[in-house]
């Protein structure tokens, strides 16, 4: 812990290691981002990319970078950061490292709305809107069912897992009702893909993230750290537990829903990013900011891999995060088992 | 020692979990600067009363008053600077050190731009010294023994710097030596720092020895309240716990000592050992 004090009674406390992890991943994300923009049907050198980004590119380069590749990269960064933030919040709220939005049914809920639009036939804007709306509706429903003198960790997890199973069933049914072409498009969306994302996909998420990041990090962050000590201890310390939980659940559900609207339900980022951040910072607490940096890096890295792993075709990014995240989870379980914690 | 005034009291409280009513029309008062101990048989509502007094449970009727004002109408942080609580179970985050955990007790005194003042640092050091965990400051809480861990949690509650401190069964799960250690610590905090303490205890003899004010409960009612010397009688123990016993003088402290009647009558009738 390092403390900065200024005259006038102001003081800031931070962990240099956590700061270094956050900054390190931010730099890594930027580096991967430049590589991602450089590659493709019209290859550029990283120097070309930097020149174009700073306004010195040819009109062709300008178009390729700012209209085609940058929106995809920005969407990846935002989706990664949003999912990681939501995951870190969920894990801290339910005090369970498996408490992520993919496990608790929120992602499946967002997918249900999107699938309904696919079956009925609708624009991609309608699809995004429906994903957000049904993600929020799922959040409300889970909250209402889990509510009993406030919402407690375990109930939320159990209700969420049940809801997730039901929604997966509904989603499967909806897929069988869709015409074949639409079902293929829906499957791609369900895996999570950043292919062809433009500014119109990035902007809604950017807006939500720029409003909710300060609310969650600065407004709720310190209180969320107290929640780790248990509901009673947190409220004894002056945390308005119920209100905090409601605000944070709403924020996390919004983040997940808008992330799903932008890129589909990309799996495992919300689960793994906060884990990885915590292991690297070695700090107790939700590690919100480091988690966001790790999440953004993971998704950009996964998308880069998805685009370049096979020369003849691209993978959807969700397939890569699923494979990597699944492997990480297995490794983690093995480690925990060896440490005797499981 | 007791001034007759009270900063914390509950009046006409109906306390219930969902629809199960634990107490109706219950009133309790905590005398200022007292070490108040609540006793009673299992399920008599003693922990529930403590939860109500610490605003963890909102009475469905009646009110808890802190400094004359309904505790639920006051801002949470403000209450947390006046009233502290050590709950029965708390969770130590993985890998957190003693100093970090105790530091979290400063939360109600901190803000976004005032994250760690010199005052915070001083109070945390003092709290660790007062509870004898200063030497453990950099150890991980998970590695400590049960007694040490309980002292760390008490240190955290002390760091909150509240004139009133509530403890819900602080000696449960500890062996006899650690129980006495924790109670001695509480008594010292009460005497030296002038804090008002309220504890729920299971052991009647511990309660009689350490309390300056006893509240005996049964079936959601207060059966008796007052100084242990007046409250703890064989009749009261029979009424509250349904336990036949004798009350003698504690040879160590002169406080009442409850000796349960033996299963064999002969044991009761035998002359007192010299």
Image (spheres, coloured by chain):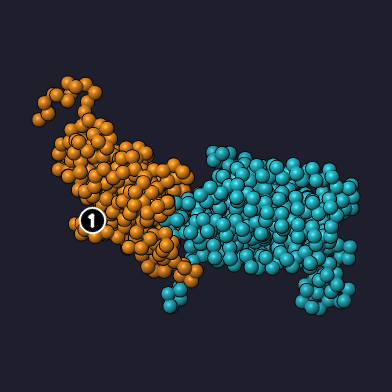
Q: Give the image quarter of residue A261.
A: bottom right
Q: Give the image quarter of residue B254.
A: top left
Q: Using the image as rendered, state which of residue A339 and residue A151 is in the foreground.
A: A151
Q: Using the image as rendered, state which of residue A275 and residue A227 is in the foreground.
A: A227
Task: State the orange chain.
Answer: B
Q: Using the image as rendered, state which of residue B81 and residue B104 is in the foreground.
A: B81
The answer to whether one can see residue A98 in this image is no
User: According to the image, label 1 marks what residue?
Assistant: B191
Colour chain A appears in: cyan
Total number of numbered discs in the rendering: 1
Q: Residue B15: where, in percent of width, then height?
A: 40, 48
Which quarter of the image is occupied by the C terminus of chain A?
top right
SS assignment at label 1: helix
- Residue at 53% x, 47% y: name it: A148
Q: Using the image as rendered, state which of residue A77 and residue A119 is in the foreground.
A: A119
Q: Residue A91: where, in percent of width, then height?
A: 58, 51
- Left or right of B136 in this view: B254: left
Q: Chain of mark 1?
A: B
- Residue at 62% x, 41% y: name it: A333
């Amino acid at each position: 812990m390092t403390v900065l004090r200024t005259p006038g009674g102001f003081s800031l406390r931070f962990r240099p290691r956590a700061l270094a992890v956050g900054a390190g991943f931010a730099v890594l994300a930027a580096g991967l981002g430049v590589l991602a923009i450089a590659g493709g049907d019209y290859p550029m050198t990283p120097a070309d990319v930097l020149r174009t980004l700073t306004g010195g590119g040819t009109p062709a380069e300008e178009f390729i970078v700012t209209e085609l590749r940058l929106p995809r990269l920005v969407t990846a960064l935002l989706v990664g950061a949003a999912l990681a933030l939501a995951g870190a919040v969920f894990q801290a709220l339910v005090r369970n490292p498996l408490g992520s939005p993919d496990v608790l049914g929120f992602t499946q809920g967002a997918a249900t709305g999107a699938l309904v639009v696919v079956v009925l036939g609708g624009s991609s804007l309608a699809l995004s809107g429906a994903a957000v709306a049904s993600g929020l509706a799922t959040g409300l429903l889970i909250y209402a069912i889990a509510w009993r003198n406030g919402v407690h960790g375990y109930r939320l997890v159990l209700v969420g897992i049940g809801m997730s199973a039901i929604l997966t069933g509904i989603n499967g049914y909806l897929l069988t009702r869709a015409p074949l072409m639409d079902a293929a498009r829906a499957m791609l969306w369900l895996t999570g893909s950043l292919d062809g994302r433009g500014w119109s996909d990035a902007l809604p998420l950017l807006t939500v993230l720029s409003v909710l990041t300060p609310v969650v990090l600065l407004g709720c962050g310190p209180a969320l750290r107290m929640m780790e000590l248990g509901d009673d201890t947190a409220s004894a310390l002056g945390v308005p537990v119920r209100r905090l939980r409601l605000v944070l659940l709403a924020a996390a559900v919004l983040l997940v829903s808008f992330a799903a609207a932008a890129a589909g339900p990309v799996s495992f980022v919300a689960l793994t990013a906060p884990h990885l951040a915590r292991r690297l910072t070695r700090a107790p607490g939700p590690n919100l900011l480091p988690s966001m940096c790790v999440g953004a890096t993971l998704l950009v890295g996964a998308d880069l891999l998805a685009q370049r792993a096979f020369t003849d075709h691209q993978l959807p990014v969700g397939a890569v995060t699923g494979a990597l995240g699944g492997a990480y989870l297995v490794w983690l379980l093995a480690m925990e088992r060896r440490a005797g914690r499981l | 020692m007791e001034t007759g005034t009270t900063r914390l009291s509950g009046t006409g409280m109906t306390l219930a979990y969902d629809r199960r009513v634990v107490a109706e029309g219950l009133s309790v008062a905590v005398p200022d600067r007292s070490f108040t101990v609540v006793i009673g048989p299992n399920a008599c509502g003693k922990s529930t009363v403590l939860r109500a007094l610490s605003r963890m449970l909102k009475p469905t009727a009646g009110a808890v008053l802190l400094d004359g004002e309904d505790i639920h109408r006051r801002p949470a942080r403000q209450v947390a600077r006046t009233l502290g609580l050590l709950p029965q179970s708390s969770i130590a985050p993985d890998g957190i050190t003693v100093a970090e955990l105790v530091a979290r007790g400063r939360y109600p005194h901190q803000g976004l731009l005032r994250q760690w003042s010199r005052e915070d640092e001083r109070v945390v050091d003092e709290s660790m010294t007062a509870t004898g965990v200063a030497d453990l400051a950099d150890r991980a809480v998970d590695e400590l023994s049960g007694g040490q861990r309980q002292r760390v949690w008490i240190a955290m509650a002390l760091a909150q710097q509240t004139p009133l401190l509530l403890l819900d069964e602080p000696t449960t799960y500890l062996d006899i030596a650690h129980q006495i250690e924790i109670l001695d610590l509480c008594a010292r905090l009460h005497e030296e720092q002038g804090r008002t303490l309220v504890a729920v205890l299971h052991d009647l003899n511990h309660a009689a020895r350490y309390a300056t004010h006893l509240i005996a409960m049964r079936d959601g009612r207060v059966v008796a309240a007052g100084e242990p010397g007046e409250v703890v009688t064989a009749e009261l123990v029979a009424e509250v716990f349904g336990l036949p016993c004798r009350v003698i003088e504690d040879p160590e402290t002169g406080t009442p000592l409850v000796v349960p009647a033996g299963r064999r009558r002969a044991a009761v009738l035998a002359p007192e050992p010299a």
